[in-house]
Amino acid sequence: MEILKFIGIALSGVVLSVVLKQYKSEYRVLISLACGILLFVLSLGYIGEIFSGLSDIAALGGINGGFFSLMLKAVGIACLCEIGVNLCRDAGESAIGSKLEFAGKLILLALSLPVFFEVLSALTALLR
C-alpha cells in the first residue's frame, strides 16, 4: 500500500496549489516543483530493486553486459528527460520542455548506435 503515500502527497500538492491559486498564484509553481521532487526522491528507493531484478533477467536471458548497461542508461535518460519536460511544462515553459525532449531523443539515438552497428554486423555475417 505504498502507493497510498504517493497519492496522498500528490493530492495534497494539488489541493494546496488550488487553494494558493486564489491568493498567491506565483507559489503554485513552487508547490508543484516541491511536490514533484518529493515524489521523485521517495520513488528512488525502488531503483535498487529494479536494477537487481533486471540484472537477474539479463543473466537468465544471457544478455551481454554491455547491452544491459546501455539499456539501463537509455531507461534512465528517458525517465530523467520525462521528469524534466514535465517540470518545464508545469512551470509554463513548454517551449523549453520541447527542446529538452528533443535533446533527450538525440542522446538516446546516439546511445543506441553501437547496438545498431552490432545488429548490422551480425546480419552481414549471416548473409556471407
Image: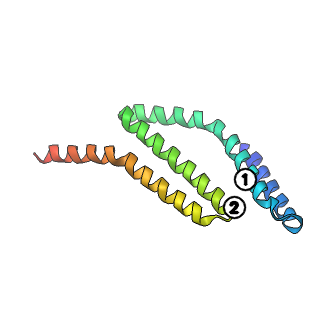
Disc 2 to disc 1, how far (Cα)?
Answer: 8 Å
Disc 1 secondary structure class:
helix
Task: Give the left or right position of residue 24, taking residue 43 as reference.
Answer: right
**Is 25 situated above or below 111?**
below
Q: Earlier in the sequence, mark 2 or mark 1?
A: 1
Residue drawn at point x = 27 percent, y = 46 percent? 117
Residue drawn at point x = 72 percent, y = 43 percent? 2
Q: Nearer the viewer, residue 127 or 117?
A: 117
Task: Give the left or right position of residue 124, taking residue 10 as reference.
Answer: left
Density class for disc 2 (Cα within 10 Å; few <14, some 14-19, many ≥20) is some
What residue would you read off at disc 1? 33
* Residue at the far right in the pictured view: 23
Residue 106, by quadrant, is bottom left
* Residue at the far bottom in the pictured view: 22
Residue 42 in the image: x percent, y percent?
A: 70, 41
* Residue type, mark 1 in image: Leu
Q: Nearer the viewer, residue 33 or 60?
A: 33
Residue 121 in the image: x percent, y percent?
A: 21, 44
Residue 30, by quadrant, is bottom right
Quadrant in which the C terminus appears: top left
Quadrant in which the N terminus appears: top right
Density class for disc 1 (Cα within 10 Å; few <14, some 14-19, many ≥20) is some
What residue would you read off at disc 2? 91
Disc 2 secondary structure class:
loop
Residue drawn at point x = 55 percent, y = 37 percent? 50
Disc number for residue 118: none
User: Pointer 2 and pointer 1: residues touching (CB < 8 Å)?
Assistant: yes
Q: Nearer the viewer, residue 108 or 58?
A: 108
* Residue type, mark 2 in image: Ala
Residue 122 in the image: x percent, y percent?
A: 21, 43
Q: Nearer the viewer, residue 34 or 99?
A: 99
